[in-house]
């Protein structure tokens, strides 16, 4: 492969990553505003993540994730320290196996946190299970749907123990689309009732 072509591919890859990251930050800022939070909180690293979990009503999961991350970091550093001080092939092999198992366990826990967080986020904004699956599999795309969607703005998230209140809807006779009662025209086709 030509080195000039490799540099162009690398630049395009970095540019795409920056664009997706920027879109995600903008989406989260809009979601924060819809939830009644200040948009700038997403820019503060630890506090932004805490606010994300606060919106979903699962701050306990946030503290559990933080404890897992801290525990993983401490155990990983300790194992690497032991690898530097212990001699012998068998001891090093066993420590490497433990380190690999620890990494796999940490990844599984973080994937589970992502799944439960996505489900809670969809529920907090009164979305269904299919939308939660979309948040799990394609987060930037479905965050954009949530950020630019038609949800009522200004403090619309649920407390952890409340059930979502489903809006009253009317069905359009022309296209079959569901519309809120307060609308007099169909959101999909524009038919006036």
Image (spheres, rainbow, N blue to C red):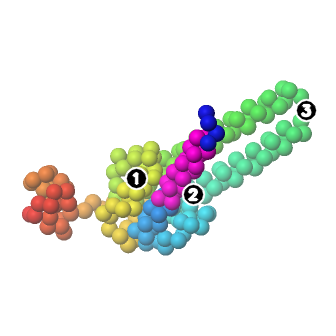
> Contact, CB < 8 Å: mark 1 with mark 2?
no
User: In which image quadrant can residue 30 be found?
Assistant: bottom left
- Numbered tag placed on residue 62 in the rendering: 2
Determine if the magenta segment contains residue 12.
yes
Residue 185 found in image quarter? bottom left
* Residue 4 visible to the viewer: yes
x, y percentage for residue 75?
75, 45
- The answer to if 116 sits in the magenta stretch is no
Residue 11 relative to residue 115: left or right = right
**At x 41% / y 51%, what residue is drawn?**
141
Q: Which residues are magenta?
A: 5-23
C-alpha span from label 1 to label 2: 21 Å
Query: Residue under circle 3?
Result: 87
Depth check: give the residue in front, 158 or 171: 171
Q: Secondary structure at mark 3?
A: loop
Mark 1 vs mark 2, foreground winner is 1
Mark 3–mark 1 Cα distance, whole angstroms, equals 50 Å
The image shows residue 80 at horizontal and vertical percentages of: 81, 42
Task: Name the quarter where the N terminus is drawn.
Answer: top right
Q: Which residue is mark 1?
A: 142
Which residue extends farthest top? Answer: 90
Question: What secondary structure prevails in the magenta region?
Answer: helix
Quadrant placement of the C terminus: bottom left
């Amino acid at each position: 492969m030509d080195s000039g072509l490799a540099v162009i591919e690398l630049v395009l890859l970095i540019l795409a990553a920056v664009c997706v990251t920027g879109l995600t930050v903008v989406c989260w800022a809009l979601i924060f505003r819809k939830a009644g939070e200040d948009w700038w909180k997403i820019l503060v690293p630890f506090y932004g993540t805490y606010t994300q979990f606060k919106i979903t009503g699962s701050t306990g999961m946030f503290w559990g994730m933080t404890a897992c991350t801290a525990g993983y970091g401490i155990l990983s550093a300790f194992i690497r320290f032991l690898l530097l001080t212990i001699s012998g092939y068998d001891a090093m092999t066993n420590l490497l196996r433990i380190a690999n198992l620890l990494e796999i366990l940490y990844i599984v826990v973080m994937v589970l946190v992502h799944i439960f967080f996505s489900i809670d986020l969809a529920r907090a904004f009164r979305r269904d299970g299919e939308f939660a699956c979309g948040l799990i599999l394609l987060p930037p795309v479905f965050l954009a749907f949530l950020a630019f969607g038609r949800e009522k703005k200004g403090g619309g998230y649920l407390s952890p123990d409340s059930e979502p209140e489903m809006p009253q809807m009317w069905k359009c006779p022309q296209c079959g689309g569901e519309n809120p009662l307060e609308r007099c025209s169909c959101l999909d086709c524009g038919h006036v009732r």
